[in-house]
Image (cartoon, rainbow, N blue to C red):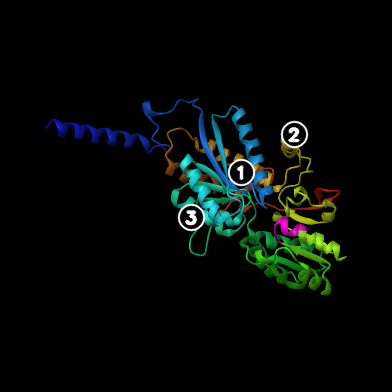
């Protein structure tokens, strides 16, 4: 009888604790269990990205800018603050899975997802299954937020999706380079590059762009010698070459084109951002290069000037678009947390659901756009900007 009484008391204790952990404003905070109005809470913010390897410029930019935003918020009078942890995934899908496991074990509550698309595609389902809200600054493949079979409702993007980049590039060329003969060099085994290419080709046909060379595909095994593609583009008369690829192979293309005396206008998308800080690259080779980006570091609005000054002061270089998107991600997450009145009583599932509700209804103003909104499939709505490299820096092309 005594043993039975102990068991019953234990069960009642467990049920009582369970009742206090769910319900009410996401966490059952009512009566004596309600947190103090001036309670300071720290939210564990995770992220993975390349902090080593060929794509480390992207990862470092995201880490640096996110940390600036976290430090600013933590120094503010907001009761909601962050602990930030970024794991190195080397832009590799398998390593991204390991990085996710490490962050999950750390107690990650919300996330900047991954920096690159390939890594994001590898862990998109993990975030969905574990109900952790995530918004990527720069993983632009649609596979991060939805597939043909499934939508990941808690996965969002701050950057343009690959299809949107392809459409925007074709539309910009139709408006500004309608008389150009266009060649394309892209990476066919990369979800990012292939996604931009496919949508660009569709929109280019709709806009009657003169694409004279479209067979410039290469793979990871052939990403060092581009003489075949460049010769074919030159022979086809291409005076604009579209490069929907990352900056590392693009730097080789620019060098090899210069060596063979081929000087078309080169045009990239957000993966090109970072080329000016690539170690050992002669930045004069990028003079006149166009790219579409939501961020121009030379903009004269107060927010941009504040961010650029803070970034240059901390890191000695001008921030790129990946940095700006990461800064916006942190502030957008914080805005949503403020809106829902996040506190220590929130359960994981309630936080996930309420963050989704916020991002699909709220409007956000940041470095990379005004009046930004998100669709239920996680895609962001904002206007792209064109920049051109002049004298070794990005300047507005418009």
Residue under label 3, please give it.
125
The answer to whether the residues at label 2 and label 3 have Cβ atoms under 8 Å apart is no
Tell me residue 151's x, y (percent): 50, 58
Sort mark 1 into few (<14), some (14-19) or many (20+) by Cα contacts within 10 Å: many
Residue under label 1, please give it.
329
| Callout 3 secondary element | helix
The image quarter containing residue 64 is top right
Residue 176 visible? The answer is: no
Q: Which residue occupies the foreground of this view, 321 or 79?
A: 321
Q: Quadrant of the N terminus?
A: top left
Pick whichever of labels 1 and 2 is earlier in the sequence: 2
Left or right: 4 as drawn, with respect to 159? left
| Callout 1 secondary element | helix
Label 3 and label 1: CA atoms lie apart by 20 Å
The answer to whether the residues at label 3 and label 1 have Cβ atoms under 8 Å apart is no
Determine which of the numbered discs, if any, sits on residue 255 in the image.
Answer: none
Label 1 and label 2: CA atoms lie apart by 21 Å
Q: Which residue is pictured at 73% across the width and 50% down the height?
A: 274
Determine which of the numbered discs, if any, sits on residue 313 in the image.
Answer: 2
Tag in front: 1 or 2: 2
Is 329 above or below relative to 78?
below
What span is in magenta? 244-251
Pick whichever of labels 3 and 1 is earlier in the sequence: 3
Q: Which residue is pictured at 53% across the width and 56% down the height?
A: 122
| Residue most extreme to the left | 1
Is 277 above or below relative to 230?
above
Tell me residue 390's x, y (percent): 85, 50
| Callout 2 secondary element | helix
Tell whether position 214 is magenta. Answer: no
Residue 33 visible? The answer is: yes
Tell me residue 25's x, y (percent): 43, 37
Secondary structure mostly taken by the magenta-highlighted segment of the chain:
helix
């Amino acid at each position: 009888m005594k043993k039975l009484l102990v068991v019953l008391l234990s069960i009642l204790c467990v049920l009582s604790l369970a009742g206090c952990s769910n319900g009410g404003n996401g966490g059952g905070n009512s009566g004596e269990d309600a947190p103090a109005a001036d309670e300071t809470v720290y939210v564990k913010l995770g992220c993975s990205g390349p902090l080593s390897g060929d794509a480390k410029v992207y990862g470092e930019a995201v880490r640096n800018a996110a940390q600036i935003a976290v430090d600013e918020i933590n120094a503010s009078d907001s009761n909601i603050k962050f602990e930030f942890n970024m794991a190195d995934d080397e832009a590799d899908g398998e390593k991204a899975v390991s990085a996710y496991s490490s962050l999950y074990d750390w107690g990650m509550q919300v996330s900047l997802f991954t920096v690159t698309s390939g890594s994001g595609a590898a862990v998109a389902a993990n975030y969905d299954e574990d109900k952790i809200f995530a918004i990527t600054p720069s993983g632009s493949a649609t596979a991060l937020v939805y597939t043909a079979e499934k939508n990941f409702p808690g996965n969002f993007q701050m950057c343009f999706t690959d299809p949107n980049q392809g459409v925007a590039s074709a539309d910009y060329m139709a408006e500004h380079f309608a008389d150009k003969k266009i060649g394309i060099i892209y990476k066919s085994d990369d979800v990012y590059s292939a996604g931009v290419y496919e949508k660009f080709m569709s929109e280019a046909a709709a806009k009657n762009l003169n694409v004279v060379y479209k067979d410039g595909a290469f793979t990871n095994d052939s990403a060092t010698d581009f003489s075949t593609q460049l010769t074919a583009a030159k022979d086809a008369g291409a005076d604009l070459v579209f490069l929907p690829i990352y900056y590392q192979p693009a730097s080789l293309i620019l060098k090899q084109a210069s060596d063979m005396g081929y000087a078309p206008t080169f045009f990239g998308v957000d993966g090109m951002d970072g080329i000016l800080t690539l170690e050992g690259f002669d930045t004069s080779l990028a003079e006149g290069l166009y790219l579409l980006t939501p961020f121009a570091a030379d903009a004269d609005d107060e927010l941009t000037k504040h961010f650029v000054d803070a970034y240059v002061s901390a890191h000695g270089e001008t921030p790129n678009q990946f940095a700006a998107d990461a800064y916006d991600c942190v502030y957008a997450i914080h805005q949503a947390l403020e809106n829902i009145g996040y506190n220590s009583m929130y359960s994981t599932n309630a936080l996930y659901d309420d963050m989704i509700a916020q991002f699909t209804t709220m409007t956000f103003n940041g470095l990379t756009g005004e009046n930004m909104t998100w669709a239920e499939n996680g895609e962001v709505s904002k206007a792209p900007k064109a920049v051109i490299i002049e004298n070794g820096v990005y300047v507005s092309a418009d």
